[in-house]
Amino acid sequence: MTDLTQLTLRQAHQALESGECSSLELTRATLERIERLEPKLHAFITLTPELALEQAAQADQLRARWRREGGELPPLLGLPLAVKDLLCLAGVRCTCGSRILENFIPPYTATSVERLLTAGMVVIGKTNTDEYAMGSSTENSAYGPTRNPWNLRHVPGGSSGGSAAAVSARLAAAALGTDTGGSVRQPASFCGITGLKPTYGRVSRYGLVAYGSSLDSVGAFGRTAQDVALVFSQMAGYDRRDATSMDLPLPAIQLEDDDSSLAGLRIGVPDEYFIQGIQPEVENAVRRAIVSFEALGAFVSPVSLPHTEYALPVYYLIAPAEASANLARYDGIRFGARLDSDNILDLFTRTRGQMFGAEVKRRIMLGTYALSAGYYDAYYGQAQKVRTLIKRDFEQAFEKVDLIAAPVAPSTAFRFDEHLDDPLAMYLEDVFTLPANLAGVPGLAFPVGFDSNNLPIGMQLMGPHFREDLLFRAAHAYQQTTDWHQRAPSLS
């Protein structure tokens, strides 16, 4: 029998429908591969083999009944899914990569996860993450770092590094991540897979433990644009439990195998994303991919996003400010672990000082300072004004083009400890992804080559609000004529 773990999500779906395999067989093959490779990669914080096998058995029973009686099956029935450990699943611990939530068992399930369970997916575990999604390398997890399947000495990116590594290493056909400043797209690029950050408000944030509430998005990983589109189509949509959820219809996403024409599509290329210091191999690969889009019929032209240079400082005022408010609840009394003390001030200080990691404390202090009396208008208030200018840049660009093409990161995956003692260097890894979060527009990352060290190179397409369908169409056409997304890391 074919190695079931090597199937894409769509191929696995076809195998289940044709009877080539059962969900139990697919799930067992996935769990066996995890058991073999997880000690090298550390992609997961919590595995749920018993739950997965139970869900897989139920999926097989439902499919057997359908074969006897007909009717309609859940669209993703029996397919394995990994979930970033920032999204709640009732009865399964949710640590957010932090010691302070080491024993937190949520009593409810995130809407995005709930909808995929309703669609029939099988949850195999919760993946590793930088603590509270604060990081670009998954080195800030309290449970140890995840390793890049292409080179174990390099990071997988972050903060959704566990999910990206799991999909890249064929430990899961699909995975959920979150993207506050690039945390889906950057690890997708570093690990050679496809990853979506949807429009802000397109996928419910209910059940996502908050980092930056005006920036957080629940996204998805797969090996192909087709795979990610399958997951996105099931988890997106209005949710009354999320006040920022938009009640808008989802456009139909139909990606045919023989559809590689992009005739009439207008793609803009911003000079602001090809800056001094970018790794030459990254720039060359992205520019070659843009030429490929032209060959597929797209019209390529330059566009300008003039306020891009301000995205980094704007983000690192707004996101930490929101984080300082969101994380105030973890005080040793209301939520999370408690380090007992004789007085309440010492209880606060000991719990937060010892149970939060260095990067989380750094961002809380940055955010608290930006929100403090006398500095609010000069820092946070000013950052919000510039954020509006960044959003306006995108709106004006999308009056001229349908999509914007750019690199995901200035370099390929860097080595462990390379940026750990230099926060600014780490923050600069997100310089190309932050603007989409500030503007709330969707972005899709996918592989377009490899560097001389055989590390993947990714590019991103960004689109107008709520036009994820355009992103999938363009990336799918590109993947019909290239094989970068088919290449797999060598893991024995």
Image (tube, rainbow, N blue to C red):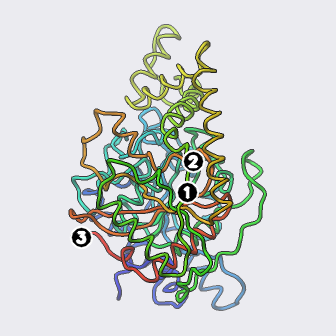
Is 317 located above or below residue 206 in the figure?
A: above
Quarter occupied by the N terminus? bottom left
**Residue 410, position as x, y percentages in the image:** 36, 51
N-term mark: 2 or 1: 1
Nearest-to-viewer mark from 1 and 3:
1
Is 118 located above or below residue 62 in the figure?
A: above
The three-letter amino acid code for the residue at tag 3 is Ser
Alpha-carbon span between mark 1 and mark 3? 28 Å
**Residue 452, position as x, y percentages in the image:** 21, 64
Q: Secondary structure at mark 3?
A: loop
Q: Secondary structure at mark 2?
A: helix
In-front residue for pair 275/414:
275
Q: Residue at x 53, y 89 (%)?
A: 258
Q: Which residue is mark 2?
A: 437
The crowd level at tag 1 (other Cα within 10 Å; few <14, some 14-19, many 20+) is: many
Nearest-to-viewer mark from 3 and 2:
2
Q: Place residue 39 in its image quadrant.
A: bottom left
CB under 8 Å between discs 2 and 1: yes
Alpha-carbon span between mark 2 and mark 1? 9 Å
Q: Which residue is mark 3?
A: 490
In-front residue for pair 487/29:
487
**Residue 412, position as x, y percentages in the image:** 31, 56
Disc assigned to residue 197: 1
CB under 8 Å between discs 3 and 2: no
Q: Residue at x 52, y 40 (%)?
A: 311
